[in-house]
Image (cartoon, helix red, strand yellow):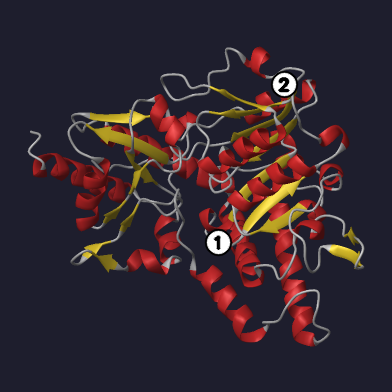
Amino acid sequence: MSRELTGVLPELEVIRKDFPILSRTVSGGHPLVYLDSANTSQKPQVVIDTMVDHLERHNANVARAMHQLGAEASEAFEDARDKVAAFIKAPSRDEVVFTKNATEALNLVANTFAWAEGELSIGAGDEVLITEMEHHSNIVPWQLLTQRKGATLRWFGLTDDGRLDLSNIDELINERTKVVSLTWVSNMLGTINPVAEIARRAHEVGAIVVVDASQAAPQLPVDVVASGADLLAFTGHKVVGPTGIGVLWGRKSLLDQLPPFHGGGEMIETVTMERSTYAKAPHRFEAGTPPIVEAVGLGAAVDYLTHIGLENIHLHEQAITGYALEGLATIPGLTVLGPLDATQRGGAISFEIDGVHPHDIAQVLDARGVAVRAGHHCAKPAHARFGVQSSTRMSSYLYTTPAEIDALVEGLEYTRSYFKLD
């Protein structure tokens, strides 16, 4: 099936050599075909080397140690903040808060809104709006908030082709709406949502817009101001960075109004036995020793992606995704969940095959060296909307080749034969 694809990164083979894990074999000598990047991306050698160099030569705590190593660690940590700010086109480095992942970032937002006073406070009669395609990390925190505060949780439904149903947007976004929180790109359906359009409508009623960009940041150029977001979260391990590091961006004026999330070192101005006063953002939200080497690794990761160009990565993802959709369409009994237009979706494609459990599909593929994910992908409500408990998901990235998609399709053909579906 492999053919020449328009949009595929011309230096693809060079890029692949940057990722040492892609050269290994698995499952009885099969070459690794890694199609689980929506779960976690692989890491280029430069990220690995940068983290090792920091640990070997500059390891110390930040903003505490009054010696050269401490100064070097602090400089490296804050340089990473500068790099992330540039990556997402943030107006100020002080708008970038480091967290341990996007889940913590979203929980930070929901909890600080629960504790906020004045115009940011949420209570009985107020509404929080999410969508039916959210990752659990952008559902559960808002459920907890609205339950604790007596507010109402509402959501956009989904159309049959896996897009947001915006037919009742004027009903759902109204004068009672305090927060609209939604994913930019669905981790299950692949759908790219019209975030800026929804943000404009939300701002008309004075609502705060929170965007989960965990799947967008790896594959789309992100401009936080142009997106219309007031707060935006993503995670390092999906943008070829390490685990244990996430990002919360917020408008400075908004961050300065939010109360602290965690209490401890470095988030304070002064502490007495009676009361404490708090540092300004971003340090107000970074209590305790932060993930220092992880932040340094994330800085190297966004440098790497910036060098390749997010516009180029996006075109590559569209080309590979379109090729994958063509290949999946040749498999009898296979149904894709989500949009079928590669220009309207990201690189995660969830699907079912009649008569085969998703876990069995993943296991058979794994035996052939093809790594995919099976389950509900932390998106149970979206699966329920389409009447399925789980699905198999393939997800490509900047290092994915057409030949790897061919290996997936061949593996699925073998799966049908293995389970005697022909």
Looking at the image, which residue is at 85% across and 39% down?
A: 117
Q: Position of residue 215 (x, y in %)?
A: 53, 44
Is 353 placed left or right of 122 in the picture? left
60 up-or-down from 47: above or below = below
Q: Residues within 10 Å of mark 2 (few under 14, many from 20)?
A: some
Q: Nearer the viewer, residue 297 or 169?
A: 169
Quadrant location of the C terminus? Answer: top left
Q: Residues within 10 Å of mark 1 (few under 14, many from 20)?
A: many
Q: Nearer the viewer, residue 88 or 132?
A: 132
Secondary structure category for the residue under label 2: helix
Asked whether residue 314 appears in the rendered view, the answer is yes
User: Label 2 is placed on what type of residue?
Assistant: Arg
Mark 1 residue type: Gly
Give percent across and percent down for residue 99: 66, 58
Q: Is residue 41 left or right of residue 304?
A: left
Q: In this orientation, which residue lies closer to the viewer: 153 or 72? A: 153
Q: On the picture, is 336 further left or further right than 84? A: left
User: Pointer 1: what residue?
Assistant: 241
Q: Position of residue 54 (x, y in %)?
A: 63, 79
Residue at 66% across, 50% down: 105
* Residue 216 as seen in the image, left or right of residue 189: right
The secondary element bearing badge 1 is classed as loop
Q: Which residue is mark 2?
A: 201
Q: Is residue 228 visible?
A: no
Residue 106 drawn above or below residue 291:
above
